[in-house]
């Protein structure tokens, strides 16, 4: 059980202070630095952060003190209420900057400067300060002043163009995460700037564009683009869903996601000359045969020549995948995965949230942490450290603060 204010042994960023003005998914930037041991101070405006009103909520009770979104991204942070738009608030913020090492903010470009709290002003207060600004499109360029939602950022970053099913319109990625990419990149960039500061003594301003961050998610796409351009004469990447196009035909191609008795599994069902794929497929057929579900034609099938992707037809794919699907529908994910491990079949279960939480591997590595919430009268399960370190172990030291506990005096320094 993790207590409210449990302290760790020496942490990687323990001497350093972060002033966190970010909102939404960008809150993850401060959380990452806090997980690494930094003293992160979440600064909220009077009335509380708007991110406290983002769901889902504890037991579906819509209340700013019960936002699970807020809980998730605000562990390992202290907090204060401070109105940086007032003269007193600005002076108090500058006092904090004097003893800070990082400032993270996600306001629209120019907002901090309009308050007299831009990087040039803060640099005069603390020459070594690292200020990281996260915005939808960055601080320069024709879109710099544009607002954006998660949907528009993914669309303008290019990723939505290849997300969805063949022959259907593009779809949005299920959970809003563009700002999470921006926040994670901001944390990484802040640490890179910190290394530079350690070498030179110089602080700097970091300009993070969420659009650029999500565009980097296309890093695996060029190999498919070259393939499609060369073999299919296409100028754009198509949406393929869980399928893979064939070298000589586009849709629907080979399927990799199959239904089973209690959900779905990811299965690589290939032939040709690759010995690993070939052995996996033959082991699957053997497994089907032991259960009386492999027809004679499948047991005699020439996987090397008749299931070679270079000359495979959709009719053959549909016939093979049809009988395989019938078999998979008789087994649970757990049964299939256990047999796959024994036999060397390239198969993995598609886990839902409950199954991820109960996953044996994550449990064995103590990934989940129980954090006490006295205001709720119980503990809540959180994601634990994102890595294990032999020196300066990571853990949750502080639960998210309730708004009632956030005052200037609660800072203590």
Image (cartoon, grey):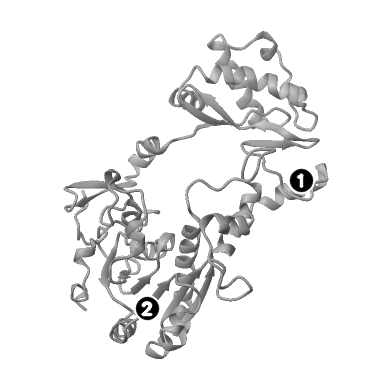
Residue that lies at the very extreme toward the bottom in this rendered image: 124
Left or right of residue 35, residue 250 in this image:
right
Q: Residue at x 28, y 67 (%)?
A: 47
Displayed quadrant of residue 241: top right
Q: Quadrant of the C terminus?
A: bottom left
Give the distance between the C-alpha atoms of the residues marked 2 and 1, in whole angstroms: 47 Å
Which label belongs to residue 227?
1
Residue 103, horizontal then vertical, whole percent: 39, 75
Secondary structure under badge 1?
helix
On the question of residue 271 being in view, the answer is yes
Residue 407, horizontal then vertical, whole percent: 21, 72
Residue 186, horizontal then vertical, whole percent: 47, 67
Q: Residue at x 41, y 85 (%)?
A: 122
Label 2 sits on residue: 101
Left or right of residue 391, residue 261 in this image:
right
Residue 344, horizontal then vertical, whole percent: 55, 28
For residue 238, above or below residue 329 = below
Q: Residue at x 48, y 69 (%)?
A: 134
Look at the numbered discs 2 and 1 and tell me whether their residues touch, using CB distance below 8 Å.
Answer: no
Displayed quadrant of residue 14: bottom left
């Amino acid at each position: 059980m993790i207590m409210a204010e449990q302290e760790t042994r020496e942490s990687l960023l323990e001497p350093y202070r972060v002033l966190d003005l970010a909102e939404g998914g960008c809150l993850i930037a401060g959380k990452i630095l806090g997980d690494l041991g930094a003293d992160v101070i979440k600064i909220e405006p009077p009335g509380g952060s708007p991110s406290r009103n983002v769901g889902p909520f504890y037991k579906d009770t819509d209340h700013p003190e019960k936002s699970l979104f807020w809980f998730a991204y605000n562990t390992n942070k202290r907090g204060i209420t401070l109105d940086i738009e007032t003269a007193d608030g600005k002076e108090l913020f500058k006092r904090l900057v004097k003893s800070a090492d990082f400032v993270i903010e996600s306001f629209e470009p120019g907002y901090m400067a309009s308050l007299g709290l831009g990087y040039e002003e803060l640099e005069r207060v603390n020459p070594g300060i690292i200020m990281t600004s996260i915005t939808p499109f960055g601080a320069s360029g024709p879109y710099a002043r544009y607002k954006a939602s998660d949907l528009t950022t993914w669309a303008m970053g290019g990723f939505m163009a290849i997300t969805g099913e063949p022959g259907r319109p593009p779809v949005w990625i299920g959970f809003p995460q563009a700002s999470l990419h921006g926040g994670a990149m901001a944390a990484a960039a802040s640490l890179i700037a910190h290394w530079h500061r350690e070498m030179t003594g110089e602080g700097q301003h970091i300009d993070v564009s969420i659009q650029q961050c999500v565009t980097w998610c296309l890093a695996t796409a060029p190999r498919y683009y070259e393939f499609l351009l060369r073999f299919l004469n296409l100028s754009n990447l198509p949406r393929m869903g869980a399928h893979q196009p064939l070298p000589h035909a586009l849709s629907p191609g080979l399927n990799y996601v199959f239904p089973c008795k209690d959900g779905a599994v990811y299965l690589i069902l290939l032939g040709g000359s690759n010995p690993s794929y070939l052995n996996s497929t033959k082991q699957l057929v053997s497994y089907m045969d032991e259960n009386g579900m492999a027809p004679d034609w499948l047991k005699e099938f020439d996987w090397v020549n008749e299931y070679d992707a270079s000359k495979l037809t959709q009719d053959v794919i549909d016939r093979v995948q049809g009988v395989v699907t019938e078999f998979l529908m008789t087994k649970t994910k757990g049964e299939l995965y256990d047999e796959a491990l024994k036999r060397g079949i390239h198969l993995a279960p598609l886990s839902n949230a409950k199954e991820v939480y109960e996953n044996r591997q994550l449990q064995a590595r103590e990934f989940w942490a129980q954090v006490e919430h006295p205001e709720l009268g119980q503990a809540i399960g959180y994601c634990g450290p994102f890595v294990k370190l032999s020196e300066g172990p990571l853990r949750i030291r502080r639960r998210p603060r309730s708004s009632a506990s956030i005052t200037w005096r609660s800072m203590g320094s």
